[in-house]
Image: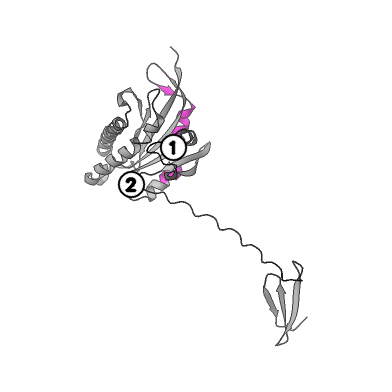
Amino acid sequence: MNAELEYRAVLAVDVERSAGRGDRALMEIRARLSEMLREAFAASGVDWDACLRHDLGDGLRVTAPAGTRKAALVHPLVPELAVRLRTHNRTASPLTRIRVRVALHAGDVHVAPTGEVAGSPLEVLARLLDAPPARAALAKAPESVTASLLLSRHYYDETVRHGHLGLFPEDFRQVTCAVKEHTSDAWLHLPGWTVPREPAAAAPAAPQPAAPGIPAGSKMVNRASGHGVVYATQHGTQHIDITGRP
């Protein structure tokens, strides 16, 4: 039987700095993360057991059931997950503390009867999950900030920008996602933390108007004491020739 083409929301989670912690720590991290995701999905009214889940090694990809409200996967799901992660980290050892990057996208995917999912939306999701802006923002945030969220433009435009209950567009910052061959705009949010905005580039200084009666670009030559000659442009820059030559 051929796979069905269905519009689905897809979510991916990746654990920050998971490499080098050892197998025992990684197994505990995976178990605790799966448990907290299940709780966060339940708090959002999304049936965890009806989701299609695929192991990413140090993370998870989740395809939501058809008809799932996309807004629910942003709020309250991500804040609920962030709170649970922070609570876990308060008593966890350094090896088993968890901070995650979360990515969200939606589109037409092929869903096989066996539960396999394929399609270009998953490629976009993978690029979002690995995007440098999300990595950098989470790395710079305080340890109490346990999650970053990166939305595709499609997801943001269909959900967040409308300002539905619990969704505040001003909490998201537009960034550029450039990973491998994929380049696109995306929207970044860190629950409990305001992502610092890049400083705006300084505007070039406006040229000073020329003095009345002096054409733009002209040069004035005036004699000065000490046998020098003072050269001045209309912008007020002065050059003094102390050789005394005109």
Q: Quadrant of residue 219?
A: bottom right
User: Does 194 lie within the magenta span?
Assistant: no
Q: Which of marks 1 and 2 is nearer the N terminus?
A: 2
Specify the segment rendered in magenta.
Answer: 111-135
Categorize mark 2 by other alpha carbons within 10 Å: few (<14), some (14-19), many (20+): many
In the rendered image of this protein, does residue 39 appear above or below residue 85? above
Which quadrant would residue 122 be assigned to in this image? top left
Under mark 1, the amino acid is: Val
- Secondary structure at numbered mark 2: loop
The residue located at (48%, 35%) in the rendering is 157
Per the image, the residue denoted by label 1 is 160
Left of 182 or right of it: where is 18?
Answer: left
Distance between the alpha carbons at the discs numbered 1 and 2: 21 Å
Residue position marked by numbered label 2 in the rendering:
145
- x%, y% of residue 127? 46, 36
The stretch drawn in magenta includes residue 127? yes
Q: Report x, y in % for residue 91.
A: 21, 45
- Label 1 residue SS: helix
Are dots 1 and 2 in contact, CB under 8 Å?
Answer: no
- Outermost residue to the bottom: 226
- Relative placement, left or right, of 219 versus 58 is right
Quarter of the picture containing the N terminus is top left
Image quadrant in which you'd find residue 7: top left
Q: Which amino acid does label 2 sit on?
A: Val
- 1 or 2: mark nearer the eye: 1
Q: Where is residue 242 shown, x and y percent of the image?
A: 70, 83
